[in-house]
Structures are given as C-alpha cells and as structure tokens.
Amino acid sequence: MTKIVVVDDDVFILQLISEYLKKESYEVTSFSSGKTLIEHVRTDRPDCLVLDIMMPGIDGLSLLTQLREFTEMPIIMISARGEESDRIHGLELGCSDFLTKPFNPRELVGRVKAMLRLSKAGTSASDNKKVVEDGEVCRAGNLSIFADYRKVTVDGRELNLTSREFDLLLFLSNHLERPFGREHLIQQVWSYDFIGDVRVVDDLVKRIRKKLVEYHSTLVINTVWGFGYKATVQEK
C-alpha cells in the first residue's frame, strides 16, 4: 500500500487531508509537528509527504532541508501564506510542489497522484540507466564512480548520495568541462516529462557540492552563469 505522511499543526486540516487520502486507499500517517518526522521517514520510508510550512518548533522549510539530505520522495508543501517568496524558497530547497491555503482537498489528492506517477516513472528510468567508462569505473580527479554498483568514492571514502545526486554527478563526470543547461540536465536525470520548476536542478547541485567539499573532492561542479553547470577537476 502506498504510504503518505501529512504534517500540519491545524488539527482540522490534518484530519481533512487524511480522510481524503484514505478514501483513495492510501495508508496515511499524520503528525501535528515535525518533532519525530525525520526518524519516521528514515524508518518507514513513505512514498509521499504533505508538509505545512508554518508550524511551532521546527518549521516546514527546515524539515525540508533535513529530509533532502537523504530522501528524494515527493514533498508537497502547503502554506497559509501566499507569498511568492515562500514558494520560490520551497522549490529551491527541493519541494516537489506547492499549494496555498485554502485549497480544495481534491486538488491536493490530484497533485499527490501526479507526484507519485512521476516518482515511479523516474525511479524506473533511473534503474535502467547504465553508463560505464573505463570498464566499471568513471574517474575524475580523486573521485571514482562505480556505475554498475551506483557507488561513488573520494580517495577511497564512499559518499552517501541519493539516486538523483548520483545520476547528475555521473552524467557531469562523464562530460568534464562541457556545460549543460538546466533543461538538459532535467532530461538526463529525471528522464521523463518533468512538471515543476527547473530550479530543482540548483538545489540538487547545491547538495552535491556540499558533499564533495566535505570529502575534499578535486572534482567540482561550476556554475556557467546564465546557462547551467559543468564539472571540472581542480588540482589539490
């Protein structure tokens, strides 16, 4: 059964969303705060998350940042504030869709279904990908990518990457010094008809860069201003 998590401190909205999703035969788990959400997602591995921005304690955007460190499941953010800055910030941090309150619960259900279809299509495409260089390994500086095993190491230390982080890093590493636009990278990494903001690529690159810096990788992803990104090997 498909697992959906709903997080909102408004009990009425929480119950309303949960009931509509349950009518679609989804298994729904609800939280009124984000206190134990991270642990639940790590252990239960839900298929989709509906997350409110404005909550007491840790807010939705902070939770989104933590979640995107280890999962790429669809995350639909909801907010009582209709400010464009909230929507843009959420998309930059990696949310899959954004809905402003008040909204029709049937619209939310429709968006959940759409995100689940896209997520399933993306996973299937990713599973079918296989790029091999130098036999089994693509090497760029002190970084090695074992394509068959979907494993990346820097000086022998393994990086913990999500599926899309791996796919983007592999693609750029196989085309060193060649710049690619965001739309092209979306086609390569998502591999299906993408619905959303192309700036999701910026968030993906930001997460990869952070991990490469932590591991002292000589491979870096540079911004090509006004166009997109390229991978380059720098000397230590």
Image: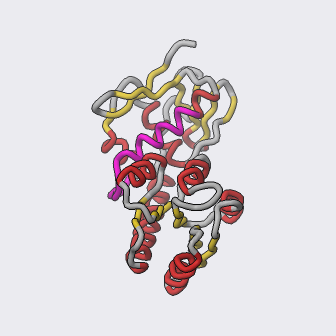
Q: Nearer the viewer, residue 235 or 65?
A: 65
Is residue 156 visible in this depiction of the protein?
yes
Q: Tell me the residue at 46%/49% (across/down).
A: 129
Q: Extreme left residue here?
A: 226
Magenta segment includes 136: no
**Can you give x and y, in whole percent of width and height, for residue 210 in the image?**
56, 33
Q: Nearer the viewer, residue 132 or 167?
A: 167
Is residue 5 visible in this depiction of the protein?
no
**Can you give x and y, in whole percent of width and height, for residue 154 in the image?**
63, 27
Q: Tell me the residue at 58%/24% (across/down).
A: 217
Q: Tell me the residue at 42%/69% (across/down).
A: 101
Q: Nearer the viewer, residue 168 or 40?
A: 40
- Give the residues drawn in magenta, as a range: 191-210
**Can you give x and y, in whole percent of width and height, for residue 196 in the image?**
35, 56
Tell me the quarter of the picture where residue 225 sits. top left
Tell me the quarter of the picture where residue 40 sits. bottom right
Q: Tell me the residue at 58%/61% (across/down).
A: 55
Q: Extreme top residue here?
A: 235
Q: Is residue 224 left or right of residue 146?
A: left
Q: How is the image coloured?
A: secondary structure
Q: Quadrant of the C terminus?
A: top right
Magenta segment includes 208: yes
